Amino acid sequence: MINISTTLIYNGTILTMNADNEVYSPGYVYIQHDHIVETGAWPLEEGSVRHRLEADRKIDAGGKAVIPGLINGHTHLFQTFLRGVSDDHPLSEWLRQVIWPGSLAMEAEDFYLAALIGCIENLKSGATYIMDHHYIHTYEENTENVLRAMVESGIRGHLARGGVDLSYEPRLREEEDVIFERTAALLDRWQGEGTGRIEIAMGPLNLYGCSRPFLERAAKFSRDRNLITHIHVAETRDQIDNTLSRFGLRNLELVEAVGMLGPRTQVVHGIWLDDGELELLAQHQASVIHCPVSNMYLASGVARVPEMRKAGINVALGTDGPGSNNCQDNLEVLKFTACLHKVYHLDSTMLPPMEVLEMGTRGGAKAMGREKDLGSLEPGKKADIVIIDMQKAHIAPIHRYSSALVYNANGNDVHTVLVNGQIVVEAGRCTLVDEEEIIRHAQARVNRLREKLMNRYPVYSVRS
């Protein structure tokens, strides 16, 4: 095997996504091992240092855009096995008819295969980093199988160990002590695995499924270990009514009251937040993970993203799980983000392309506490890079690359992906796993899953 220590990506349009949103067209990125050393204009000026031209590996990005890896701030990888079962339910019925029965019928091997396909899909649609909110613990191996898939695929990311101790589907509840014991065990076993690519977060699933003592303990657990806390908040109107009736507090007011709100907090969705709650977000420097496709799919509502950004609140983007999207196309999310807010506000000037790209890159990096080494193409940052083929009939000819990326490109246009300086997607194919064999095996398992469920849950018997 050839030892690759230096890589030169050249001749492409480089969208650095740095603080000045510099673009080099054409430009280059020079990499040593797992980090970026230089970016700049191409071709090199006369007398420039020759070692760039003598790199171990050279990637000609002519006709392509080169961007920092997108960060998928919220997904549920296991739902790869449940996508498209039924597309016409509000959140509560979707959970009861599709997600709960499907997840309860899945076996430990299914969680590994579902996660592996989910990681492949994320990488091939431009996400080098994912936050997987995993909350199905029907088999002890489930969570480790998801983490094993993340390591094997080559992706970077967090697993937020989800759990509920109170309401929700009874068969998915856990004892409070069990949740914290198993989260601590994951930290001991998996934190820093995959050459530092894997991290563990605290992930209480939602507010309506958790008791106040559990939420308070989760907040302390996260603070003591300096963990991200990742939690669904204010996704539907009913969730606001739930916490008001139980505690006399709105959703985010409860998050603050239990000591959970801070710079390491990720508020997922945050659709039904009022003015006071937006002030709390800004005051505590928490991040919001905006999932526009899921919010539209489930008709949950529209988050106040332009107002959040105006207030200085960090907003990152997520696909949400494949059960409510139905895919995890991270480039597609860019277009939906822009279009949703333009039509909702009846204002075509809302969220221009560079702002959307900022949320998908720097916004995600900040939410993960990784703004110092991820989110832009700058010297010293990790070599998590996506190269997108722009010479296609649905994209070219191009006036502005930022516009073409947001409004034209989709996951099928991703050509090459590097994570930690390693090529994990090349010419549109994953390099570390056998996609065809994984998909074949997964389809056989899903066919078996449908057979187990179709008599009791009609949505699993419908074929068209």
Image: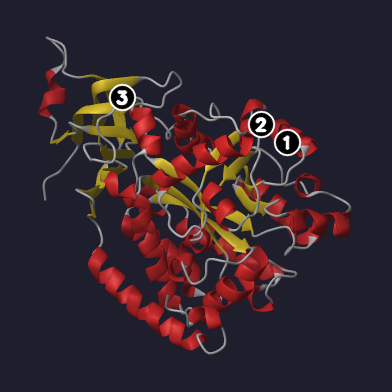
Label 2 sits on a secondary structure element that is helix
Residue 278: give its label: 1
**Left or right: 55 as drawn, with respect to 375:** left
Relative horizontal placement of residue 376, taking residue 286 as reference (left or right): left
Rendering quarter of residue 90: bottom right
Identified at 74% across, 70% down, the residue is 167
Question: Circles 3 and 1: CB distance less than 8 Å?
Answer: no
Q: Mark 2 against mark 1, which lies toward the viewer? A: 2
Q: In the rendered structure, which amino acid carries the disc numbered 2?
A: Glu
Residue in front for this viewpoint, 124 or 161: 124
Instruction: Residue 436: tell me if it is visible.
Output: yes
Q: Amino acid at mark 3?
A: His
Under circle 1, the secondary element is: helix
Seen at 50% across and 37% down, the residue is 338
Q: Which mark is residue 307?
A: 2
Residue underneath mark 3: 399
Give coordinates of residue 17: x percent, y percent: 41, 27
The x, y position of residue 120, in whole percent, is: 33, 57
Residue 464, picture quadrant: bottom left
Q: Report the residue that reaches farthest toward the top.
A: 46
Residue contact between numbered discs 2 and 1, judged by CB atoms under 8 Å: yes
